[in-house]
Amino acid sequence: MALYTIADLHLSSVTNKPMGIFGARWTDHTEKLITRWNALVTPEDTVVIPGDVSWGMTLAETAEDFRIIDSLPGQKIIGKGNHDYWWTTVAKMKKFLADIGVTTVDFLFNNAFLQPDCVVCGSRGWYIEEKLQATPDPTDYEKIVNRECMRLEASLVQGESLRGEQELPLVAFLHFPPVFGDFVCQPLIDVMKKYGVKQCYYGHIHGNYYVPHTMEYEGVNLSLISADYLNFTPQRVFI
């Protein structure tokens, strides 16, 4: 019953959205992902996918992508990324998956998941610096960061409740990096420190294969697990 993680699958069964602009590593990336996932993950395992799962714009357009995910071994816990435009309420997403026969997927959103060796917590996070938002319309950076901090805290509070008296670590899975290069989203770091998080996994970064896999910031280890960075091989979460 191992725990794995990998972000940014960027599946596009219906929506034509090639990822080649980020480099040759993305060539036939869906086939690579399927092959390497099947070689590693067993049906008893769980895989956390922190965002950017499908290029579908609506739930209906994600159906084939979710069927691909469902066909892979293990249970999957999916968080929200900045390109998951199909994301709606958890109730609607769960009903949609049930309607199309997907049974191995759940959603990480204001909640947490108890695992044998840790508790899975997390949120989307937000861009590490206001000028890097690259959103089509003006957005209130501070408001969004505060909202994501509230969602992360809600997840960590539930995580504390789930672990009860067990001395299990709370592990955070974010889509955006809370720290990258010289930029820091301090409010997210502060929330993790408040609840004793020592390990955080994040995605979003593509085409940058020479940055350290893990760095430490104020006592929190931050690990990059974008699919292309991992060469489309889920990473084992060791506690």
Image: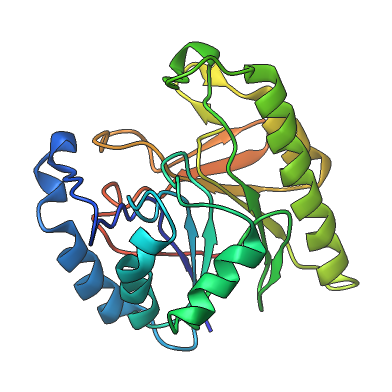
| Percent x, y of residue 103 | 50, 83
Q: Quadrant of residue 211?
A: top left
Q: Vertically, is 68 above or below 11?
A: below
Q: Residue at x 56, y 36 (%)?
A: 216
Q: Residue at x 53, y 80 (%)?
A: 98
Left or right of residue 35: residue 69: right
What residue occupies the far right of the structure in this picture?
165
| Percent x, y of residue 109 | 66, 55
Q: Nearer the viewer, residue 86 or 27?
A: 86
Left or right of residue 228: residue 200: right
Q: Is residue 104 visible?
A: no
What residue occupies the far top of the structure in this picture?
131
Q: Nearer the viewer, residue 151 or 229?
A: 151
Q: Nearer the viewer, residue 141 or 199?
A: 141
Q: Residue at x 82, y 70 (%)?
A: 162
Left or right of residue 94: residue 156: right
Colour scheme:
rainbow
Q: Nearer the viewer, residue 6 or 117?
A: 6
Q: Residue at x 68, y 68 (%)?
A: 118
Q: Vertically, is 229 above or below 98?
A: above
Q: How many marks?
A: 0
Quadrant into which the C terminus falls? bottom right
| Percent x, y of residue 185 | 62, 24
Q: Is residue 123 visible?
A: yes
Q: Vertically, is 234 above or below 100?
A: above
| Percent x, y of residue 182 | 49, 16
